[in-house]
Image (cartoon, grey):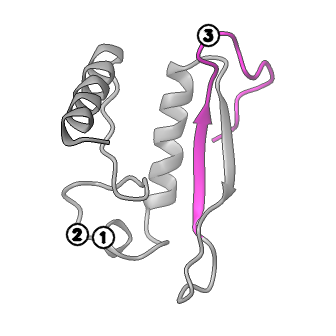
Amino acid sequence: MSAAASDNLSDAIAEHDEAVGDAIWVGSEPTFTLRHSESSEWLSEPLGGDKYAYALRMMAALQKRHPGSMVLRTVGRQYAAEDVPRWSIGLLERRDGKPLWKGPADPL
């Protein structure tokens, strides 16, 4: 992808996020972090602290804003030096607006 195409895509994503009222800051894998935190789980450690609880609160808020969506919890990456795999939480929904899930919401 050319630099110009990448810039255009980045601009389109930013415009979309602003239009729907979501502000997402993405790391490199993708991941999420607290921009101003100095705690190790937000800077370098794979697990620990309040990061998982924060993720659950964030996911619950997103799930409420996207009725019919479905939470997907999976085992995340595990690097050679890590004893246990990381966690991974995703929110899936259909692009056509139809509910993907009609059952009860995940009890995040």
Q: Residue at x 61, y 10 (%)?
A: 97
- The secondary element bearing badge 3 is classed as loop
Q: Is residue 26 magenta?
A: no
Q: Nearer the viewer, mark 1 or mark 2?
A: 1
Q: Amino acid at mark 1?
A: Leu
Tell me residue 28's x, y (percent): 35, 58
The reply to whether callout 1 and callout 3 are in contact (CB within 8 Å) is no
Cα gap from disc 1 to disc 2, whole angstroms? 7 Å
Q: Which residue is mark 1?
A: 43
Q: Are marks 1 and 2 in contact (CB under 8 Å)?
A: yes
Mark 1 residue element: helix
Nearest the eye: 65 or 80:
80
* Residue under pointer 3: 96
Q: CA distance from mark 3 to mark 2?
A: 40 Å
Is 106 within the magenta? yes
Determine the CA span between mark 1 and mark 3: 37 Å
**Which residues are drawn in magenta?**
86-108
